[in-house]
């Protein structure tokens, strides 16, 4: 049976909230569902989370939930006629004090701090960089510009500053309320939009932990890397996060499209080195919003992210609002499986010059190395927190890693880990019983047959987080 290592994150929206459609998407390969808090009410998200949990249970497959915070709204206001057509060389005013609807001469701002953040000579990019304006002067609350690259500008389009430098905080009052909603539905991950540095992520962690305390829950935190300022701070951001998202839309506008592929490779590599998860996102299968098949370029894009070592590839509007949400998931799963067949990353290279300060980390690495050279059919990690499985998943091995845990929160967290299949099992019994149950499960799934070799890592005594201290090589009975 095919064993896809790369996980698929799908955004839920009007196109995918029908129970039958969602069930088909989960069966087709969705591992984590993204709830986009830029749209919908708190109740919408609570209802969708309940739908995901009940559908996943019906399918018999655990699916993680990621709450994606909106972040600061750095946008223009509304126009009297909904939009204007801007031409090269025209003057245009972005006015924080304007209250009436916009016209061909200017428009108000949702982001009132813009006049303080820019000066003459700065370049502003609107509507994902499709419109470019040169700042000529700032008078009071009015930013005077000249249109360098024109086009249609409509209501509430986003504003970026070339090279970064907008002062908007990563967490808005709306985000703080949304964190409470996300914790009430016990989202497994919270994605934080537009963090500039570690401090933004530390604040998000405090807010999440406070909001989650009544539910005895702790979510994983994903930093969305979409600001130019975040790039030099990447290692510090990773240090205090559980993972990052390569958010290529806003990032491309700030640093330039051409810089993004190299940054993507750098971010994925650094995340893996630091034992963090990484999601690659934005326009991966964009044409499938309206077309039943992807372009060749999109196929290559997804495949390259897989070959770079990303944990997950993400779908946004493709599954939230597109015409072909199910087909998009099917196509993405097929591309990932095919790309993984061509991977070649000598495992030995990962161990050169490495030292391990923790016993559980050393056992995890020993299991990888031994299983790889014995050509084992699988690695089984009996884990409470999921750390052992995470460490193993940072390296490429051509065998599945089954993470067996008694904690549902750990099982759901591991839905995002590359090449990890999280299983919920009562491991409170004695070690021999738990190992026998694990082997029976592998046989029932067709992963191992009698005589096949597989590796197991376990902690003794069992049930202690961080206590993995034993590696056992088994031959299936």
Image: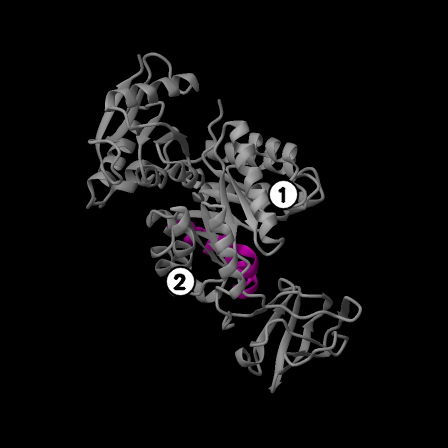
Q: Determine the main secondary structure of the stretch shown in magenta.
A: helix
Viewer-nearest residue: 296 or 200: 200
Viewer-nearest residue: 160 or 199: 199
SS at mark 2? helix
Residue that mark 2 sits on: 203
What colouring method underlies this structural image?
Answer: one colour
For the question of whether residue 261 can be seen, the reply is no
For the question of whether residue 364 can be seen, the reply is yes
Q: Which residues are magenta?
A: 246-269
Picture quadrant of residue 151 = bottom right
In the image, residue 266 lies in the stretch drawn in magenta: yes
The x and y percentages for residue 161 are: 56, 71
Foreground: disc 1 or disc 2: 2
* In the image, farthest residue toward the front: 214
Count how many numbered circles sit on residues in the image: 2
Q: Is residue 122 left or right of residue 440?
A: right
Residue that mark 1 sits on: 319
Compare marks 1 and 2 and give the one earlier in the sequence: 2
The x and y percentages for residue 12 are: 60, 44
């Amino acid at each position: 049976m095919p064993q896809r290592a790369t996980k698929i994150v799908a955004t839920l929206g009007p196109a995918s909230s029908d129970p039958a459609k969602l069930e088909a998407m989960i069966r087709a390969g969705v591992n984590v569902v993204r709830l986009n808090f830029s749209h919908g009410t708190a109740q919408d998200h609570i209802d969708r989370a309940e739908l995901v949990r009940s559908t996943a249970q019906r399918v018999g497959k655990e699916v993680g939930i990621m709450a994606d915070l909106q972040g600061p709204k750095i946008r223009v206001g509304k126009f009297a006629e909904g939009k204007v057509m801007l031409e090269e060389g025209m003057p245009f005013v972005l006015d924080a004090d304007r209250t009436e609807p916009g016209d061909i001469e200017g428009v108000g701002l949702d982001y009132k701090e813009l006049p303080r953040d820019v000066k003459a000579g700065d370049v502003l990019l609107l509507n994902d960089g499709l419109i470019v304006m040169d700042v000529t002067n700032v008078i009071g609350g009015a930013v005077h510009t000249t249109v360098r690259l024109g086009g249609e500008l409509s209501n509430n389009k986003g504003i970026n500053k070339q090279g970064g430098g907008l002062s908007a905080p990563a967490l808005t009052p709306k985000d703080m309320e949304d964190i409470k909603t996300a914790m009430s539905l016990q989202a497994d991950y919270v994605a934080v939009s537009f963090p500039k540095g570690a401090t933004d992520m530390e604040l998000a962690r405090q807010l999440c932990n406070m909001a989650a305390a009544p539910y005895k829950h702790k979510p994983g935190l994903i930093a969305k890397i979409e600001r130019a300022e975040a790039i030099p701070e990447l290692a510090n951001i990773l240090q205090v996060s559980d993972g990052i998202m390569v958010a290529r839309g806003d990032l491309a506008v700030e640093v330039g499209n051409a810089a993004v592929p190299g940054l993507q490779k750098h971010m994925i590599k650094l995340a893996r080195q630091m034992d963090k998860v990484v999601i690659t996102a934005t326009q991966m299968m964009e044409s499938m919003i309206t077309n039943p098949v992807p372009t060749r370029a999109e196929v290559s894009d997804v495949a390259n992210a897989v070959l770079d070592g990303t944990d997950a590839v993400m779908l946004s509007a493709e599954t939230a609002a597109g015409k072909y949400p199910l087909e998009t998931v099917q196509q993405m799963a097929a591309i990932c499986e095919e790309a993984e067949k061509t991977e070649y990353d000598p495992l030995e290279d990962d161990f050169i010059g490495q030292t391990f300060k923790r016993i559980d980390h050393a056992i995890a690495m020993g299991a990888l190395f031994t299983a790889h050279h014995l050509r084992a059919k699988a690695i089984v990690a009996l884990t409470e927190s999921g750390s052992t499985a995470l460490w193993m998943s940072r390296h490429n091995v051509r065998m599945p890693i089954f993470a067996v845990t008694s904690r549902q929160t750990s099982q759901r967290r591991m839905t995002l880990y590359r090449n990890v299949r999280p299983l919920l099992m009562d491991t409170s019994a004695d070690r021999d019983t738990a190992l026998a149950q694990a082997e029976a499960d592998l046989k029932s799934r067709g992963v191992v047959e009698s005589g096949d070799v597989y590796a197991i890592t376990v902690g003794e005594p069992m049930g202690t987080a961080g206590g993995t201290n034993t590696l056992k090589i088994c031959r299936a009975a």
